Structures are given as C-alpha cells and as structure tokens.
Image (cartoon, rainbow, N blue to C red):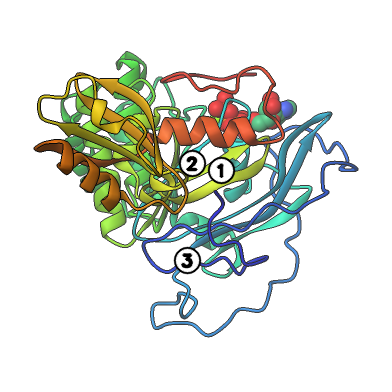
Amino acid sequence: MIAAGRGPLAGLGGPGRLAATPPAAGNTGGMPHTGSGGERTGAVPSPPAVGPRTADGLPAGGGSSLELHDLARRFGDVVALDGLSMTVPPGQVVGFLGPNGAGKTTAMRAVFGLVRLDRGDVLWRGAPVGPADRRRFGYMPEERGLYPGMVVRDQLEYLGRLHGMLATEARAAADRWLGVLGVSERARSKVESLSLGNQQRVQLAAALLHEPDLLVLDEPLSGLDPVGIDAVGAVLAAQAAAGRTVLFSSHQLDLVEDLCASAAIIDAGRLVAAGSVDELTSAGQRRLVVKVHGDLAGAWAAGLAGASVSRVDGGAVRLVLDPGADPQRVLAAAMAAGPVETFAVERRRLSEVFLEAVGASPAAGRAGAVPAAGAGQGR
Ligand SMILES: Nc1ncnc2c1ncn2[C@@H]1O[C@H](COP(=O)(O)OP(=O)(O)OP(=O)(O)O)[C@@H](O)[C@H]1O
Ligand SMILES: [Mg+2]
C-alpha cells in the first residue's frame, strides 16, 4: 500500500505518521549518464512556495521535516533512483527498506549532497537543503568513514569540531556517547584496534555528537551484537522522542518492526509502500487465530461463512476473513462450539509486507529481491 499520496510535496502526514507521495509515472528513460557518486550537488532549483510556518519553523499543519521529491539518478544503464518521493516526519523512527541495489544508499547520499541528482529535490523543513542545514544533520554512511589510525576520542573531538562544536564540548559529547553506546573503555584506543561492531558504535557516536536535527543512518545495525542493537534502538527512540527526524536503512526486518514507528519500502528506485508499521502490517486481508477448547482439529470452523481456514495447528485455527466479513460472527460461531481459549487478530510480519510490496513492484523477478538478515552489498 502507498500511504497518503496527494501529489507532489503535498503528502505531509501529521506528526507521528509517515507520508509518501506516489512515484511519478513514465520517467524511466532518457536520463543521461552523469558519472559516478561522490559528487557535490549542483545548482538547486528555485525553492517551491513554502506555506506559513509554526513558531519552531516547521510548515504549519504539516510537521514534515525531510522531503525527497521525485529523486532520479542513473549510473550508466543502472537506474538507481527513479522518481523517489517520500516525506519523513520528525518525532518517530522511520525504517528505510528495500532489496540490495534498491537505491537506499543513493537516496541517503543525496540528502548530504554526495550524489548529483539527474532530477528532483531534497527539502528540509520545506526549503531546499543547504550546507547550513547539513551541519545540523548527522550521517552514518554505508562506507564507514573513520580514520583507522586515529584514537577514538580524538577522532570524535575532531569530527565534533567540524560540526562547529568547541573542543571541550566535543570531548564531553564524545565521552557521553561512548558511554551510552558501551564503548567508553575503548576511548583511548586507535579505531583500527576495535572490533567491527565497536567501530560501528563509534561511527554512530560520530553521527550523534552535535545533537543533529536529522539523523540519517545507513545500516546502523549491521554487525552489531544484541546488546549493541538494544543500545542503538534505545538511542534512536530517544532521539525521535526528543522531536528529531530519524531515518535508517536496514535489512533486519524483524528489528525494524520492533524499532520503527513507520517504514518506507523502495524497490528499483521507487517507493512501493509506506506508512506506519501498524498500518502496513494490518493492511490487506484480515486474519484471525481462534481456538476452541477441546477441538484439536478445528472442526467448528468447517464451512464457516465469511472466512476460510488457512491452517489448523494444535486446535488453533488460522482464518483469512473475506472482505467485509464481520469477525464477531466468527467469534459467535466459535463460542457456539465451545469455550473460546484464543481469539486474536493476526497481523502480518513486516517481512511479509516487504516481500509482497517488492514482489508486486515492476522490478520483481530480478535476482536479489529478498533481503537476508544483515546482508551486505549487492553490487
Ligand atoms: N557510484 C556508483 N556508480 C555506479 N553505480 C552505482 C553507484 N552508486 C550506486 N550505484 C548503483 O545504483 C543502484 C542502487 O544502489 P544503492 O547503493 O543505492 O542501493 P541500496 O539500496 O543501498 O543497496 P544495499 O541494500 O545493497 O545497500 C545499484 O544498482 C548500484 O549498483
Ligand atoms: Mg546501501
């Protein structure tokens, strides 16, 4: 499902809701090859009209922070971004999902001006993003960017100063974040002497040092142990609760389901599904799990009107409701058969939503559409 498509730049969800605009149609051809990544963004088109602002500078009534509008980028024959539009609101953790090569990293790099776009705009709080905005952003790149030979604490102090912090502030922030992320004892070690997971934690500390308004994290969970994942999850939740905008990519969909309020799924450079995790996992056909005491075969459900049995497991009958069918009628039928032990609406897992969204997208059928937990690069 694609949420809240109301035309270009209009898909601003209220706070606490991810909005998305549908991808533009008919834009797959004709884009010139403009070289490889690592470039700075070219001239930014004139800003779109910006409506009234709230006291804190957000567009009134919108609450949107980061908007990707019709982003397109081709590398030779490869279409990395194909009219990607989505809005990431503040105050919630948003997962950015897609198969290997879907365009996640390219889109994130575009936010930082690290890839030249063939078309499209990145807007921050309603205006084209500029260098001053970017100093208030925090980025954890896919290709980690720490200096291997530098001492962790010195490295963080240096990076903090690049974001305009005083040395004392940067040192204090470094110590604080290294503590929160459980790597304090490595503060005086060289980066290269740390395990990969601990380097990852330091890299996240680097993104957080200057208390950025926007956090963009490219696979921050990959390579982390469960303690690290918990720590990072707690940090992201706290950042969102403080009103910041948090977007992170991951292939670990079960973790994303736990950590994120919303998710955007892209494939072949286009948005294919977006919305709150609740919406995404409860959309589509409704499913019930019902167990009647003593009926291990689920005989009570045979011939039930308005629902079909998909599986019976130790007396727990899994049912798919027909569109418009009333679950209360199923409950009544179960109660008529005996004491009801379980009656629950079953949600889909986010991984099912992902596979369905990606399977239905035009890029379906190409290799590598299914993400593996902690999968790396697909190039
Ligand atoms: N600098 C580049 N030069 C050539 N092709 C590129 C470059 N950057 C990205 N691509 C191509 O663009 C497509 C999108 O890549 P991108 O890294 O954005 O995908 P991704 O969604 O981040 O994938 P993954 O999950 O594997 O990290 C891929 O086909 C990739 O090979
Ligand atoms: Mg990537």
Residue 67 percent location from the top left of the image: 57, 59
**Badge 1, how many Cα within 10 Å: few under 14, some, many 20+?**
many
Residue bearing the label numbered 2: 96
Q: Nearer the viewer, residue 154 or 32?
A: 32
Whether 183 is drawn above or below 333: the answer is above
Quarter where residue 109 is shown = top right
Judge left or right: residue 338 versus residue 23. Answer: left
Pick whichever of labels 1 and 2 is earlier in the sequence. 2
Residue at image point 68% right, 42% down: 115
| Disc 1 C-beta below 8 A from ligand 1 | yes
Residue 10 percent location from the top left of the image: 60, 69
What distance separates the C-alpha of mark 3 from that of mark 2?
A: 17 Å
Residue 121 percent location from the top left of the image: 68, 58
The type of residue carrying mark 2 is Phe
Q: Nearer the viewer, residue 333 or 240?
A: 333
> Mark 2 and mark 1 in contact (Cβ < 8 Å)?
yes
Q: Nearer the viewer, residue 73 or 23?
A: 23
Please state the quadrant of the image where ligand 1 appears.
top right
Q: Is residue 290 visible?
A: yes
Residue bearing the label numbered 1: 108
Whether 223 is drawn above or below 173: the answer is above
Q: Any mark on residue 13, and which?
A: 3
